Image (spheres, coloured by chain):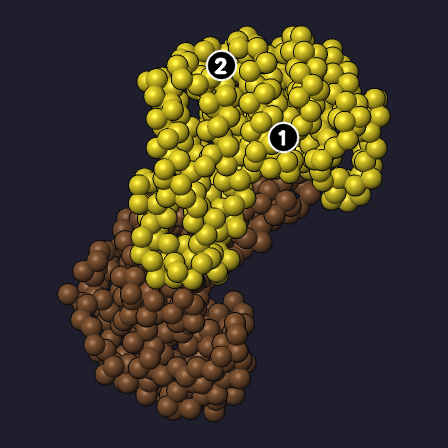
Chain colours: A yellow, B brown
Amino acid sequence: MTLRFTLEARDAGTAARAGVIATERGAFPTPAFMPVGTAATVKGVWPAQLREMGYGCILGNTYHLYLRPGHERIRGQGGLHRFMGWDRLILTDSGGFQVFSLSALRKVSDEAVSFRSHIDGSAHILTPELAVTVQEALGSDLRMVLDECVEYPAERAEAEEAVRRTTLWARRSLAARTLEGGGMFGIVQGGMFPELRRRSVEEICALPFQGFAVGGVSVGEGKELQRETVARTVPMLPECRPRYLMGVGTPGDILFAVSRGVDLFDCVLPTRNARNGMMFTSGGTVSIKQARYADDPLPPDERCDCPTCRAFSRAYLRHLYLQREMLASMAMTVHNLHAYARLMERAREAISRGVFPELVKELRISGIE
Amino acid sequence: MTLRFTLEARDAGTAARAGVIATERGAFPTPAFMPVGTAATVKGVWPAQLREMGYGCILGNTYHLYLRPGHERIRGQGGLHRFMGWDRLILTDSGGFQVFSLSALRKVSDEAVSFRSHIDGSAHILTPELAVTVQEALGSDLRMVLDECVEYPAERAEAEEAVRRTTLWARRSLAARTLEGGGMFGIVQGGMFPELRRRSVEEICALPFQGFAVGGVSVGEGKELQRETVARTVPMLPECRPRYLMGVGTPGDILFAVSRGVDLFDCVLPTRNARNGMMFTSGGTVSIKQARYADDPLPPDERCDCPTCRAFSRAYLRHLYLQREMLASMAMTVHNLHAYARLMERAREAISRGVFPELVKELRISGIE
């Protein structure tokens, strides 16, 4: 079976919706957040902990895995799931975003992107076909097409060219598939130009993808412009397919996008910020490096029941953070991912009960924008 | 109640013994290994994981905790147990060993050791009384006296002076106690000089300590000399008190010392080596950085049932290690501590069943010396 998406509830007051994504490997409810497991590990967390938090799908980065340890090595180990000890779903990106953001000397043509590895400078050529091949070798369940993501700000001509190329590559990606099962997502580009977004939606959504992603946001455009783009683009996507907003975001950004009908999210914020000592709590963010927490016996969030909040105080976490102890990153990552999991759980529940706007209001009052 | 030690079994063929150490906080069986939790955390491990592995007592380093975050801060947080979320026993050292090995510009007199912090160069004075005060503030269950540990090799006169000073400090430590409960351990010094070891045993064991430690080993003297010293010193210690061999060691060193009647061990080997990619397995040590493991689908130890061996392959751990992913250290630390916990469990069981020499033989055949 390929990816199946079932819509189970719609919020009356907004475009928010709750559903289930199912593949042969398993199913998970949406709207969902997917923790980022860049190098075949969500940094600082055991796979069993992700399961306990209720995550049904995590993200792997094709660019990183292609370079290290190599997709053929992972295929030889039985695929990414077995390699990393994760038996639920995995979404892989195409590698394109990292090529554009991390690598050196990249050169893009209709045929391919050539680039040099950010690790050792070695030369590589990424084609839409190779992005499919690599993801099939990894054995991920949800796969993304190679797209061209323009920077912000971008000239209109540049954004238009990226839309054209993204559609060209989307068609080649579909033709390059050799495996049944799972699902491939098309990606909509168009920068911050409404007309280009519309054109990209028309071209991409005409193709037989199992899901659709909004790419090219969270590239430095700012909260307002991002929300504008989301609000304009998402309603144009087909109702019956899962919608994925790539690289977003803060709890507030996610809630906004859910209210506009987005189903899937990924972002390094909860994990990366945890390693930098920042925690998402029901009362807003807490930066554990602040001296005010040196003798604070309270847990990071008194309303949270995660393993970190049940066992550790702010004073202890601050001590661990200042001492650069691994447990600082481990514990704060678990807290943040737990907070994101609970946020999505509450969103799904509120949508099912028809009270999503009330949840948004309640969370906004407690400091989540 | 102060520390109570109950001998439950004695091996017929060796001096090995099995017992239980009990305080008001709880009890744990001996012989036991205590993971090192230097800065109020066993690096890379959640307290809950230590509990699951069966550890009943861990070690905290007074020197580190005194400097960062400070013992008064920890006292203010309800003590070290509550601070670090660990409800079983904690043994703290006196800080002396780190003062002698880590700090700068140290100067020792009968009165005190003055030193400069290895972190910021600040000046400090450590007396036997302060070592007691700090450990009482931490609220540890088993406490160590400040002793003078000489380097290896040492002149006889130097070692003799350290024996004299260690006894002087031991008396002052006993007098400095203000808390009931738990237990204080005296430490035997004497370098590699049999006669000085005997003198130190006579002086220290005449004092009303709840346990006795052999200090001044594992300081670079080598396996043979260490075992000689252990074999000569341990039999002189009182039968009815727990015996602690400080800073030892490899599985083989521990088995040897158990066979000579030692009850307690601590060492950074399983944790530090894990972070350096080295694992203890039933077939000997595995260095995961070796290229031979790049495509090895086997778990670190096929005979191990730890969370790491159940979920991860050598190929995956090598990938994590090369990528400097936290999970590499986390997973290998869990494996090594699990292996040490199982080793001690098997030792206790073998002593109880009267087959300890057979266990030693079996483990030696499989590569543990």
Q: Depth check: A211 or B206 in front?
A: A211
Can see residue B185? Answer: yes
Where in the figure is residue B138, as x and y percent of width and height? 31, 67
Q: Which residue in the structure is indicated by mark 1?
A: A217
Q: Label 1 amino acid?
A: Val
Q: Depth check: A66 or A315 in front?
A: A315
Q: Chain of mark 1?
A: A
Q: Residues within 10 Å of mark 1 (few under 14, many from 20)?
A: many
Which label is found at residue A22? 2
Which quadrant: the C terminus of chain A? Answer: top left
Where in the figure is residue A20, as x and y percent of width and height? 45, 15
Where in the figure is residue B219, as x and y percent of width and height? 50, 73
Q: Residue at x 60, y 19 (%)?
A: A233
Q: Residue at x 61, y 48 (%)?
A: B324
Q: Depth check: B205 or B174 in front?
A: B174
Question: Where is B197 relative to A243, above or below?
Answer: below
Q: Is residue B317 left or right of residue B96?
A: right
Question: Where is B133 relative to A330, above or below?
Answer: below
